[in-house]
Image (cartoon, rainbow, N blue to C red):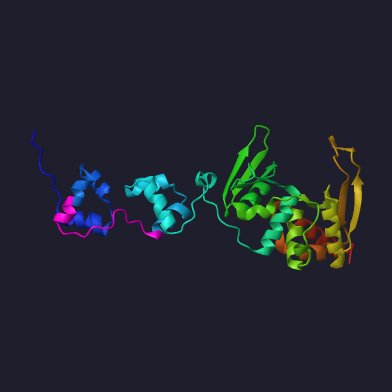
């Protein structure tokens, strides 16, 4: 049977191939013909042909690294083979991703490097977060917590959403599981230890940030018997001891003592270890403590409760019950 000669104008072919940078395979699909036919027309029209698969390095970086597209996806986009994309990655010295990272569906971004932010995250992690990798060589670090507190969910998103995907799944019992998926630059969150690292202790700003993170996880500001107070209970004797020493260095009077023994029951829960507490009760000490820690606190409830303590002190001063 006679088949009409394939027809495409030089103007249309030049626009698609030279201006829009479409591949011969892409153009062939538009015109329902073979890509060799398009190549022949390019030669007939004296339109200079690009190298067989012209894939700019910038475009490959954008697709493969920034957008996390797979080589298979990119090869289909450019009408070439998987092997061609792998060869271009090698040619441009673009590191090939591991299988686990290549299968990631959401972008992950490197930690900022800010040491105060790092100290805060470590404090918050040691107080209230579970951090792990599913396998020893996994590329993804998972940070998670279970909470019934909405401000905690908001805080988790505020801290980690800029760096990776965050999910919040509510259970039937009303609690919410929050999971954050981060890359390997957050491996500093993996260790779980009952002490504050030396680089944090040696830097006052970093220690304030660390203490704020730990307080956001474990601390309580409240008004009891019409008096503003701060307390923090924890199994972490080492960390509380170092926070106690830091408060002493800043001339903030506080008490550090054991409140429960291992095996004791409190509100129906058995204590797995001894429970230790830090108290700050004096008016002047509380105000100084608030001034010291306020710039670094992030938890909505902690900030709100701290404001109530300050307001309580102001009201008592107005009444003349304290100076």
Q: Quadrant of the C terminus?
A: bottom right
| Magenta stretch: includes residue 48 | yes
Which of these two is toward me, 153 or 13? Answer: 13
Left or right? Give the position of 1 relative to 51.
left
| Magenta stretch: includes residue 69 | no
Residue 301 pos. (x, y %): 72, 51
Residue 104 pos. (x, y %): 52, 45
Q: Quadrant of the N terminus?
A: top left
Observer able to see residue 304: no
Residue 267 pos. (x, y %): 84, 37
Report which quarter residue 6 is drawn in.
top left
Magenta residue span: 40-57
Left or right? Give the position of 27 relative to 198.
left
Left or right? Give the position of 105 relative to 273.
left
Query: How many circles with numbers are drawn on the protein?
Result: 0
Which of these two is toward me, 193 or 204? Answer: 193
Predominant SS along the magenta part: loop
Report which quarter residue 238 is drawn in.
bottom right
Observer able to see residue 50: yes
Which of these two is toward me, 186 or 309? Answer: 186
Pick out the residue farthest to the left: 2
Residue at position x 83%, y 63% in the image: 246
Report which quarter residue 34 is drawn in.
top left
Left or right? Give the position of 168 relative to 85.
right
Q: Is residue 136 above or below residue 12?
A: above
Residue at position x 17%, y 51% in the image: 40
């Amino acid at each position: 049977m006679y088949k009409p000669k394939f027809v495409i104008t030089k103007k249309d072919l030049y626009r698609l191939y030279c201006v829009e940078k479409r591949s011969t395979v892409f153009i062939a699909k538009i015109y329902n013909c073979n890509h060799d036919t398009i190549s022949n027309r390019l030669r007939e029209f004296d339109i200079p042909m690009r190298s067989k698969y012209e894939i700019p390095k910038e475009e490959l970086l954008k697709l493969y690294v920034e957008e996390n597209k797979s080589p298979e996806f990119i090869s289909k986009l450019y009408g070439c083979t998987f092997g061609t994309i792998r060869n271009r990655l090698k040619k441009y010295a673009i590191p090939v991703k591991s299988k686990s990272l290549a299968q990631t569906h959401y972008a992950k971004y490197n930690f900022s490097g800010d040491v105060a932010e790092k100290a805060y995250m470590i404090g918050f992690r040691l107080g209230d977060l579970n951090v792990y990798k599913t396998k020893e060589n996994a590329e993804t670090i998972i940070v998670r917590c279970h909470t019934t507190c909405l401000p905690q969910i908001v805080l988790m998103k505020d801290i980690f959403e800029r760096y990776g995907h965050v999910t919040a799944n509510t259970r039937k019992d009303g609690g919410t599981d929050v999971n954050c998926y981060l890359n390997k630059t957050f491996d500093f969150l993996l260790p779980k230890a009952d002490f504050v690292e030396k680089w944090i202790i040696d830097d006052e700003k970093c220690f304030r940030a660390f203490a704020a993170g730990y307080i956001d996880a474990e601390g309580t500001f409240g008004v009891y018997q019409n008096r503003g107070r701060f307390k923090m209970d924890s199994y972490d004797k080492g960390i509380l001891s170092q926070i106690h020493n830091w408060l002493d260095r800043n001339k903030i009077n506080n008490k550090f003592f054991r409140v429960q023994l291992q095996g004791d029951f409190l509100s129906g829960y058995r204590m797995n270890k001894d429970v230790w507490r830090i108290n700050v009760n004096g008016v002047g000490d509380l105000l100084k403590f608030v001034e010291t820690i306020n710039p670094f606190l992030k938890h909505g409830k902690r900030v709100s409760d701290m404001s109530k303590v300050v307001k309580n002190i102001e009201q008592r001063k107005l009444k003349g019950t304290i100076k």
